[in-house]
């Protein structure tokens, strides 16, 4: 390995993100399994122990090579890695009385090089349930939060540190300075560049593809567009064919727009296939998020094979290209010890089989959204394409929630009383909604209820209620705020599946939301604006719309966006005026504990 930082992977959502952040500081980094032999780390100048979904006191925790802590190298443990180092060296880890998901304030004690240049208190991002109760010999507390008295610890003499929070995520504002300080402690060279990565990626594409050609699935988003350009640069347009599939789950006018702007940018080797009937049939009668995602993924491959056959392109001469990013892999449980959060359409079992057979090429698979945008800019793509809002491969299929109409069988009265008490302390009314959405808490998938609140409140109060609810009420993993009407209607589940009528209603609401964002000049500031349709109704006919705008550079963590109140008031009334809409909610949940998408 080049002189740099080794990141040990314990299955956490952020292991590769740590490597990304080291690269952002121009340090070289590689990710290794937690069982790696020290002999394979020759040249390493420091080790970072990543987070993970397990507990160190589990009967069967992830395997770990203890010799890694005997190498005499500076070490930094993050979240699970912090707990593992403390326990292995003689400390004690227990289940915390309070879970922490989201923002916290770290009170920093003076004197540690790791926090050089930071203030006495800093905002940090937490995602944990366990906590260190007793420190190993030689360690001292370097920082604490209200709910975590050992949030930062270290043996300064041996340069071994542990942080319960995540400095690698964008929502620890000065986390990069912490990592920069660690690289300085390690004496890590700063020689890595994105330009060098682009050159290496082109050479890797040529080596992997050999004399075959690439059939690339092109959504029109930044990921597939950058992959398209990179493949064209590496192989030439005669050996690359792009296929954009209209799956019937696209935004209003999306397919025509994708075809037009890719054509303007010189991508002439692109064909468009309308397969909306195939996709609607594939998800008929489905309600479960994972089942829908698997069905959509399978149908993409079926349509791809059909087009290959129609064009008389021999499958053995063509490999499948995808604009897969690392978050797609980790959220799909695609590394050892990683928990499944949600299966991305480009990570279903059939794709994994093709990957194992060497029939898939994914030139961006180790990158994150911020790196892909950087790469796209360096390759010459215009800002209008590089900064397009992401849109999931299954599209509106995962933004249009479905139900068989049966209300939850679990008694929610106790959770309702506890949650209402928390909201009431902020002057808000609350109701737990009879539907579930996907979340991520402590590197695990959750599938739990959102709660809706209403009443007068500013963003700070809403964030406080949301954080407290999702940290303490296990039945709740997401909170929404009522925008319209003034009083929350009595909403019940209605029987509703994916159909053109529901998708068309969602398309119209989504178009209004995107237009409002554009007119306000916020398309660049807001990272993604999802519009979600819930089968919640007061009369069995109408439905409920949720707005989900977020701020995030990499989509591994996210903050809910704080949009102007007058803009939201107008938008909510416009959506209500579409007809068929009972209420408009605004998602005020960070990631974690809520995922960016609801499914």
Image: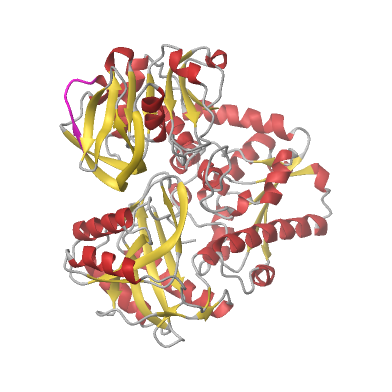
Q: Where residue 561 sits: x, y (%)?
A: 31, 56
Quadrant location of the N terminus?
top right
Range drawn in magenta:
106-112
- Left or right: where does residue 272 sit relative to residue 528? right
Total labels: the figure holds 0
Nearest the camera: 291 or 322? 291
Residue found 41% across the figure and 16% down from its top: 189
Magenta segment: does it hold 248? Answer: no
Q: Is residue 404 visible?
A: yes
Q: Is residue 221 above or below residue 487?
A: above
Q: Is residue 191 above or below residue 568?
A: above
Residue found 35% across the figure and 38% down from its top: 94
Q: Where residue 518 sits: x, y (%)?
A: 36, 62
| Colour scheme | secondary structure
Nearest the camera: 344 or 35? 35
- Left or right: where does residue 328 sit relative to residue 565? right
Q: Where residue 457 sits: x, y (%)?
A: 18, 65
Q: Is residue 25 visible?
A: no
Nearest the camera: 313 or 173? 173
Residue found 65% across the figure and 67% down from its top: 279
Nearest the camera: 24 or 40? 40
Q: Where residue 428 sits: x, y (%)?
A: 20, 69
Q: Is residue 225 above or below residue 11?
A: below
Residue found 32% across the figure and 74% down from its top: 572
Q: Is residue 585 above or below residue 459?
A: below
User: To which quarter of the image does residue 480 belong?
Assistant: bottom left
Magenta segment: does it hold 111? Answer: yes
């Amino acid at each position: 390995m080049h002189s740099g930082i080794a990141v040990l992977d314990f299955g956490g959502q952020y292991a590769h993100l740590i490597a990304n952040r080291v690269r952002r500081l121009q340090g070289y980094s590689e990710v290794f399994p937690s069982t790696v032999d020290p002999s394979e780390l020759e040249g390493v100048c420091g080790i970072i122990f990543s987070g993970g979904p397990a507990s160190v006191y589990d009967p069967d925790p992830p395997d770990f090579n203890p010799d890694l802590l005997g190498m005499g190298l500076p070490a930094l443990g993050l979240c699970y890695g912090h707990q593992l180092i403390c326990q292995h060296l003689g400390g004690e880890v227990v289940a915390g009385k309070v879970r922490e998901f989201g923002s916290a304030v770290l009170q920093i004690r003076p004197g540690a090089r790791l926090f050089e240049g930071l203030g006495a208190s800093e905002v940090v991002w937490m995602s944990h349930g366990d906590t260190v109760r007793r420190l190993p010999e030689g360690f001292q507390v370097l920082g604490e939060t209200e709910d975590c008295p050992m949030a930062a610890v270290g043996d300064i003499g041996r340069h071994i540190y542990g942080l319960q929070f995540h400095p690698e995520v964008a929502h620890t504002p000065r986390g990069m300075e912490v990592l920069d300080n660690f690289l300085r402690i390690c004496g890590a060279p700063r020689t890595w560049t994105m330009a060098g990565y682009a050159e290496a990626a082109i050479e890797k594409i040529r080596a992997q593809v050999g004399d075959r050609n690439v059939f690339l699935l092109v959504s029109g988003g930044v990921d597939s567009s950058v992959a398209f350009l990179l493949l064209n640069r590496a192989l030439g347009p005669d050996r690359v064919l792009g296929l954009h599939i209209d799956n019937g789950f696209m935004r209003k006018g999306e397919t025509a727009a994708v075809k037009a702007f890719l054509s303007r940018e010189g991508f002439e080797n692109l064909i468009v296939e309308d397969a909306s009937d195939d996709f609607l049939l594939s998800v008929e009668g489905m309600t479960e998020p994972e089942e829908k995602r698997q069905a959509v993924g399978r149908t993409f491959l079926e349509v791809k094979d059909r087009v290959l056959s129609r064009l008389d392109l021999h499958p053995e001469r063509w490999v499948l290209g995808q604009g897969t990013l690392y978050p797609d892999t980790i959220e799909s449980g695609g590394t050892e010890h990683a928990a499944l959060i949600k299966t991305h359409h480009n990570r279903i079992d059939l794709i994994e089989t093709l990957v194992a057979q060497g029939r898939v090429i994914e030139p961006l698979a180790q990158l994150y959204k911020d790196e892909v945008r950087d790469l796209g800019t360096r390759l010459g793509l215009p800002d209008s394409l590089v900064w397009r809002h992401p849109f999931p491969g299954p599209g509106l299929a995962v933004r249009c929630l479905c139900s068989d109409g049966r209300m939850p069988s679990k008694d929610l009265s106790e959770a309702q009383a506890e949650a209402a008490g928390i909201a009431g302390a902020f002057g808000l009314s609350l109701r737990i909604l009879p539907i579930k959405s996907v979340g991520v808490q402590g590197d695990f998938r959750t599938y739990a209820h959102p709660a809706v609140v209403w009443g007068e409140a500013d963003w700070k109060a809403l964030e406080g209620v949301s954080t407290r609810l999702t940290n303490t009420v296990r039945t709740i993993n997401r909170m929404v705020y009522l925008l319209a009407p003034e009083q929350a209607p009595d909403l019940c589940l209605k029987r509703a599946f994916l159909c053109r009528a529901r998708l068309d209603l969602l398309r119209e609401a989504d178009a209004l939301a995107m237009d409002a964002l554009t007119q306000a000049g916020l398309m660049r500031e807001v990272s993604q604006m999802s519009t979600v349709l819930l089968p919640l109704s007061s009369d069995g006919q109408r439905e409920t719309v949720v707005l989900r705008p977020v701020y995030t550079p990499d989509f591994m963590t996210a903050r809910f966006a704080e949009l102007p109140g007058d803009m939201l008031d107008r938008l909510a009334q416009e959506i209500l005026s579409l007809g068929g809409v009972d209420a408009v909610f605004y998602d005020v949940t960070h990631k974690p504990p809520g995922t960016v998408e609801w499914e």
